[in-house]
Image (spheres, rainbow, N blue to C red):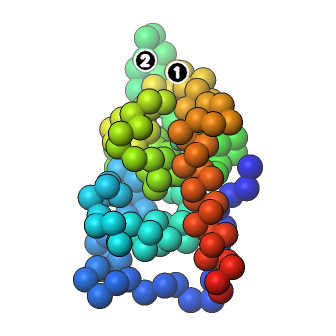
């Protein structure tokens, strides 16, 4: 699957009432939920996040957590498999979904809205949950992914 790579000559400016330094947090554990923005701000914020791309640190310390009788931790190799959307928060030691964060509305709670958008996911021993999260072709996750693509394509057309 394509990664979200947007090539732009210059970064877009924030609206006058917004400070990108405060609004746009690279660490997904520190972000303000998209639903908290006014309707006319949401796409501006989404574009800025899409320019930055998903937060995928590979060299930070992934702390171990005892699950059952084994120490488990986040595996940065998962970024290779789920690179278009998987994010890791160093501050929370949890994983998140980039496109569901950007486009999933709160009323679509199924397939891990709480786990991958609100609370973060850290069931490191259950990697299959990542595949479950993606779901079928019409899943809410894949719809959010299409919405990301559509916003990017729309922007590329008007450049
Ligand atoms: Zn998702």
Query: Where 109 sits versus 53, above or below?
Result: above
Tell which of 156 and 101 is nearer to you: 156
Residue drawn 45% across the image and 25% down it: 123
Residue at mark 2: 67
Q: Position of residue 75 (x, y in %)?
A: 58, 37
Residue 94 appears in view: no
Q: Residue at x 47, y 22 (%)?
A: 71
The quarter of the picture where residue 159 lies is bottom right
Some atom of ligand 1 lies within 8 Å of the CB belonging to the residue at label 1: no
Question: Mark 1 falls on what kind of element?
Answer: loop
Taking 93 as reference, is 27 above or below it? below
Q: From what the image shows, is residue 93 above or below residue 38? A: above
Residue 19 in the figure: left or right of residue 95: left
Which residue corresponds to mark 1?
A: 125
Residue 151 on image: x %, y %: 58, 66
Q: CA distance from mark 1 to mark 2?
A: 7 Å
CB-based contact (under 8 Å), mark 1 and mark 2: yes
**Residue at 33%, 76% in the rendered image:** 21
- Front in this rendered view, residue 32 or 77: 32
Q: Residue at x 55, y 71 (%)?
A: 51
User: Within 10 Å of the Cα at label 2, are there few (<14), some (14-19), or many (20+) other Cα atoms?
Assistant: few
């Amino acid at each position: 699957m394509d990664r979200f790579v947007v090539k732009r000559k210059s970064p877009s400016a924030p609206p006058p009432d917004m400070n990108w330094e405060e609004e746009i947090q690279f660490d997904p554990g520190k972000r303000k939920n998209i639903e908290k923005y006014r309707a006319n701000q949401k796409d501006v914020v989404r574009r800025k996040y899409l320019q930055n791309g998903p937060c995928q640190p590979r060299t930070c310390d992934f702390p171990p957590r005892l699950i059952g009788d084994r120490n488990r931790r986040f595996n940065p190799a998962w970024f290779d498999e789920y690179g278009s959307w998987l994010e890791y928060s160093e501050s929370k030691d949890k994983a998140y979904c980039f496109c569901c964060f950007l486009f999933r509305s709160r009323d679509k709670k199924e397939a891990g809205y709480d786990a991958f958008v609100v609370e973060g996911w850290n069931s490191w021993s259950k990697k299959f949950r990542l595949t479950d999260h993606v779901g079928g072709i019409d899943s809410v996750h894949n719809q959010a992914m299409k919405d990301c693509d559509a916003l990017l394509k729309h922007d590329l057309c008007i450049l």
